[in-house]
Image (tube, grey):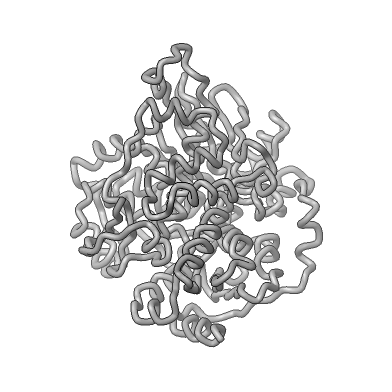
Amino acid sequence: MLYLSTRGHPDRKHFCEILLEGLAPDGGLYLPEQYPQVTPEQLSRWRGLPYADLAFEVLSLYIDDIPAGDLRAICRKTYTEEVFGTKEIVPLKQLEEGVYLQALSNGPTLAFKDMAMQLLGNLFEYELGRRGQELNILGATSGDTGSAAEYAMRGKKGVRVFMTSPYGRMSPFQQAQMFSLQDANIHNIAIEGVFDDCQDIVKAVSNDLEFKRKYKIGTVNSINWARLMAQVVYYFAGYFHATSPHPNPLPEAEGTKRVSFAVPSGNFGNICAGHVARMMGLPIDKLVLATNENDVLDEFFRTGVYRVRGGADTYETSSPSMDISKASNFERFVFDLLGRDAETVKRLFGEALAKNGRFDLGADLAFAQARARYGFLSGKSTHADRLATIRDTHRRFGVTIDTHTADGLKVARHFVQPGVPMIVLETALPIKFAATIVEALGHEPDRPARFRGIEDLPKRMTVLPADAVKVKAFVTAHLS
């Protein structure tokens, strides 16, 4: 399996090369040359596997430069009941007729990012040990990626983490999770700006090839293919949980029932993993994208116009992890949408966005057909919607959901089809956004014992302006 850049760089690379690299040298994102196709026989064989073994089966289709025994051991080390609190790892709960909630937030930092980040930490440690090298991770977070990365990388040999986040724009719990860590290999940088500024800094540093190579800079954001690849696995798990085995035991009966997924989305990474699963042949009917008031992606899927916004036009909302106006992973989908036309992708995400801050595919008569072919639908949720959905879910089902999951559930209900299970991906436990839960329900959500009093712990972080040069100077100053 070889990987190419969405912007047409001539090099083709194996998995472990792009694992440590992040962005391609031309600023593009890596994707496999072709998506491996899953047969009904494979689906039948995978149904009922423990999650760790399902992960091995899916990941082995994309990784040919790690011995199978080692990869299986990494998966089994990662996806354990001890780490994720449940034997099923990603259990499914039916809320109402046709609507399910897939729990993805049982990991160490109570967010779905743990599903990929725990694997990424073990992959980094394995590959760096094999090479005898070190890696300095520069990341950006709107709330959950940072803590998931830091908890996954703390204490890992040969790895340092420099995590940027928007100063004052995360919930108190999210800030405490990150800033209370005192590990010597963890560095938190609070940027005076919005998440998009943090993301721009990471991309700018990654595109400085001399600096990147000299200081061995890597990334844990979902621009790193390994993150997205790991997330593909829980789409398969969700499908298996939501579809009973067909009464006909023959393997070819597998895959005759379809499911849909609703995904809260800001940076397009989580739902892009669903797109990859669908391209592999997983029987996904619709991929329902849910945004908050920062509705850049909803606007695109409704109109064909992709229009990024600046910091002043990026709303601060009660689902802050989606307060994003530049969706990094969106380039991967557009690459497929345009028939893998790297030159056009390079022009759109390079010249067009730099010059106009937007591009328009809606005028193309083929856009609606192409969008339908990939199964995408979209919708928007507001603060009032979140409160109403949280209250309704608690009242009717006795389930408390976080604000981002509420966005997903609200939008999902508009697109439920008879006979097609709609699986809403949970994004975090509600304690991470306690103020809004109190506003909705009048009481604090449950808090795991290990996080009691976390907001009162000493904090360690540095505030810097939204300036890539200043961030690079900070990184180099802390490498001794």
Question: As displayed, is residue 189 above or below residue 32?
Answer: below
Q: Is residue 126 left or right of residue 272?
A: right
Q: Nearer the viewer, residue 400 or 137?
A: 137
Q: Is residue 369 left or right of residue 218?
A: left
Whether residue 327 is visible, yes or no, is no
Point out the residue furthest to the top here: 247
Q: Measuring 42% from the left and 66% from the top, which residue is drawn there?
A: 20
Q: Is residue 109 left or right of residue 242?
A: right
Question: As displayed, is residue 218 above or below residue 89?
Answer: below
Question: As displayed, is residue 421 above or below residue 446?
Answer: above
Number of numbered discs visible in the structure rendering: 0
**Quadrant in the picture for the C terminus:** bottom right
Q: Measuring 62% from the left and 31% from the top, which residue is drawn there?
A: 93
Q: Nearer the viewer, residue 424 or 58?
A: 58
Say which quarter of the image contains residue 201. Answer: bottom left
Residue 382, percent across and down?
55, 47
Residue 213, percent across and down?
38, 78
Residue 307, percent across and down?
34, 58
Q: Nearer the viewer, residue 298 or 132?
A: 132
Q: Measuring 47% from the left and 35% from the top, which residue is drawn there?
A: 236
Whether residue 173 is visible, yes or no, is yes
Residue 205, percent across and down?
41, 76
Q: Measuring 52% from the left and 72% from the top, which residue is drawn there?
A: 193
